[in-house]
Image (cartoon, rainbow, N blue to C red):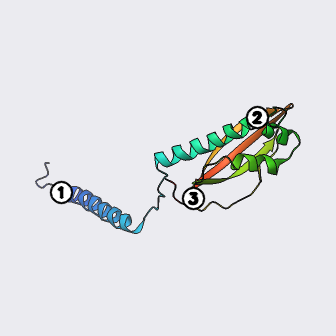
Amino acid sequence: MKHLFRDDSAQVHMIEMITLFWLFFLAAAFVIQLQVPDTNAIASDASLRLAAEDAHLLSVAVVDEDGSSTLENYLEADRRDEACTLILEQLPKTVTGNCWLAVDSGAMERAGDAEIPPSQTLSVMHLKDVDGHLWTIGVQVWHVGGGI
Protein backbone atom coordinates (compact mmCIF):
# COMPACT_ATOMS: atom_id res chain seq x y z
CA MET A 1 0.00 0.00 0.00
CA LYS A 2 1.33 3.39 -0.98
CA HIS A 3 1.43 6.34 1.38
CA LEU A 4 -0.82 9.07 0.14
CA PHE A 5 0.75 11.85 2.21
CA ARG A 6 4.26 13.27 2.60
CA ASP A 7 5.90 13.56 6.00
CA ASP A 8 7.75 16.91 6.02
CA SER A 9 7.97 17.15 9.81
CA ALA A 10 11.56 15.84 9.90
CA GLN A 11 12.66 18.48 7.43
CA VAL A 12 10.94 21.22 9.45
CA HIS A 13 12.55 19.90 12.63
CA MET A 14 16.04 20.14 11.03
CA ILE A 15 15.41 23.74 9.97
CA GLU A 16 14.27 24.58 13.50
CA MET A 17 17.42 23.03 14.97
CA ILE A 18 19.70 24.90 12.58
CA THR A 19 17.90 28.17 13.34
CA LEU A 20 18.16 27.63 17.09
CA PHE A 21 21.85 26.77 16.81
CA TRP A 22 22.44 29.91 14.73
CA LEU A 23 20.63 32.09 17.29
CA PHE A 24 22.59 30.51 20.14
CA PHE A 25 25.87 31.10 18.30
CA LEU A 26 25.04 34.76 17.71
CA ALA A 27 24.06 35.25 21.36
CA ALA A 28 27.28 33.58 22.51
CA ALA A 29 29.34 35.80 20.21
CA PHE A 30 28.11 38.85 22.10
CA VAL A 31 28.71 37.32 25.52
CA ILE A 32 32.16 35.81 24.91
CA GLN A 33 34.81 38.41 24.20
CA LEU A 34 38.44 37.50 23.81
CA GLN A 35 40.92 40.16 24.85
CA VAL A 36 43.96 39.77 22.60
CA PRO A 37 46.80 42.17 23.44
CA ASP A 38 48.36 44.18 20.67
CA THR A 39 51.83 43.09 19.67
CA ASN A 40 54.79 45.39 19.35
CA ALA A 41 55.25 46.99 15.99
CA ILE A 42 57.94 45.39 13.82
CA ALA A 43 59.95 48.62 13.81
CA SER A 44 59.83 48.75 17.61
CA ASP A 45 61.00 45.15 17.94
CA ALA A 46 63.78 45.74 15.42
CA SER A 47 65.07 48.86 17.15
CA LEU A 48 65.02 47.12 20.54
CA ARG A 49 66.84 44.11 19.17
CA LEU A 50 69.49 46.26 17.50
CA ALA A 51 69.95 48.28 20.70
CA ALA A 52 70.50 45.11 22.74
CA GLU A 53 72.82 43.57 20.14
CA ASP A 54 74.84 46.80 19.88
CA ALA A 55 75.11 47.11 23.66
CA HIS A 56 76.53 43.60 23.85
CA LEU A 57 78.98 44.16 21.00
CA LEU A 58 80.11 47.52 22.36
CA SER A 59 80.65 46.10 25.86
CA VAL A 60 82.80 43.30 24.43
CA ALA A 61 84.89 45.93 22.60
CA VAL A 62 85.72 47.86 25.79
CA VAL A 63 89.30 46.99 26.77
CA ASP A 64 91.48 47.89 29.72
CA GLU A 65 95.06 49.23 29.60
CA ASP A 66 96.41 45.69 29.02
CA GLY A 67 94.26 45.31 25.91
CA SER A 68 92.07 42.57 27.37
CA SER A 69 88.28 42.70 27.34
CA THR A 70 86.85 44.43 30.41
CA LEU A 71 83.67 42.35 30.17
CA GLU A 72 85.65 39.10 30.12
CA ASN A 73 87.69 40.27 33.12
CA TYR A 74 84.50 41.02 35.06
CA LEU A 75 83.01 37.63 34.19
CA GLU A 76 86.21 35.77 34.98
CA ALA A 77 86.29 37.42 38.43
CA ASP A 78 82.54 36.71 38.86
CA ARG A 79 81.83 40.45 39.19
CA ARG A 80 78.34 40.21 37.76
CA ASP A 81 77.07 43.65 38.76
CA GLU A 82 80.00 45.39 37.08
CA ALA A 83 79.62 43.24 33.94
CA CYS A 84 75.92 44.07 33.65
CA THR A 85 76.47 47.74 34.35
CA LEU A 86 79.03 47.82 31.54
CA ILE A 87 76.51 46.25 29.14
CA LEU A 88 73.58 48.46 30.17
CA GLU A 89 75.68 51.63 29.87
CA GLN A 90 76.05 50.90 26.15
CA LEU A 91 72.28 51.17 25.51
CA PRO A 92 71.01 54.30 23.73
CA LYS A 93 69.29 56.99 25.80
CA THR A 94 65.78 56.01 24.61
CA VAL A 95 66.20 52.38 25.66
CA THR A 96 66.77 50.90 29.10
CA GLY A 97 66.85 47.37 30.36
CA ASN A 98 67.85 44.60 32.71
CA CYS A 99 70.78 42.23 32.48
CA TRP A 100 70.57 38.53 33.30
CA LEU A 101 73.58 36.24 33.77
CA ALA A 102 74.12 32.53 34.20
CA VAL A 103 77.29 30.50 34.23
CA ASP A 104 77.53 26.92 32.94
CA SER A 105 74.25 25.17 33.83
CA GLY A 106 73.16 27.67 36.50
CA ALA A 107 69.91 29.58 36.58
CA MET A 108 69.67 33.06 35.08
CA GLU A 109 69.90 35.77 37.73
CA ARG A 110 69.33 39.48 37.29
CA ALA A 111 72.44 41.52 38.05
CA GLY A 112 73.33 45.19 38.02
CA ASP A 113 70.72 47.90 38.39
CA ALA A 114 67.33 46.21 38.12
CA GLU A 115 64.16 47.90 36.92
CA ILE A 116 60.59 46.73 36.49
CA PRO A 117 59.62 47.07 32.83
CA PRO A 118 56.59 49.34 32.32
CA SER A 119 55.57 47.73 29.05
CA GLN A 120 56.43 44.96 26.63
CA THR A 121 60.07 43.98 26.45
CA LEU A 122 62.41 42.14 24.15
CA SER A 123 65.27 39.89 25.29
CA VAL A 124 68.48 39.07 23.47
CA MET A 125 70.73 36.24 24.65
CA HIS A 126 74.42 35.63 23.98
CA LEU A 127 76.76 32.81 24.94
CA LYS A 128 80.33 33.68 25.89
CA ASP A 129 83.18 31.34 26.80
CA VAL A 130 85.39 32.82 29.50
CA ASP A 131 88.22 30.76 30.95
CA GLY A 132 86.48 27.42 30.34
CA HIS A 133 83.10 28.54 31.68
CA LEU A 134 80.11 29.16 29.44
CA TRP A 135 78.29 32.37 30.37
CA THR A 136 74.77 33.15 29.21
CA ILE A 137 74.25 36.89 28.94
CA GLY A 138 70.69 38.11 28.57
CA VAL A 139 69.73 41.72 27.91
CA GLN A 140 66.05 42.56 28.39
CA VAL A 141 65.22 45.96 26.84
CA TRP A 142 62.28 48.34 26.45
CA HIS A 143 61.67 51.89 25.27
CA VAL A 144 61.59 54.88 27.58
CA GLY A 145 60.74 58.48 26.89
CA GLY A 146 60.84 59.42 23.22
CA GLY A 147 61.57 55.97 21.80
CA ILE A 148 59.70 54.39 18.92
Q: Secondary structure at mark 2?
A: strand
| Residue designated by label 1 | 8
**The disc labelled 3 sits on which kind of residue?**
Val
Q: Secondary structure at mark 3?
A: loop
| Residue designated by label 2 | 128
| Residue designated by label 3 | 144
Q: Position of residue 15 (x, y in %)?
A: 24, 58
The residue depicted at 71 percent of the width and 46 percent of the height is 87
Compared to residue 17, the image places residue 74 above or below, namely above
The residue depicted at 83 percent of the width and 36 percent of the height is 65
CA separation, marks 3 and 2?
Answer: 28 Å
Q: Position of residue 40 (x, y in %)?
A: 49, 52
The residue depicted at 86 percent of the width and 30 percent of the height is 132
- Local packing at callout 3 (Cα closer than 10 Å; few below 14, some 14-19, many 20+) is some
Q: Position of residue 112 (x, y in %)?
A: 77, 54
Sequence-earlier tag: 1 or 2: 1
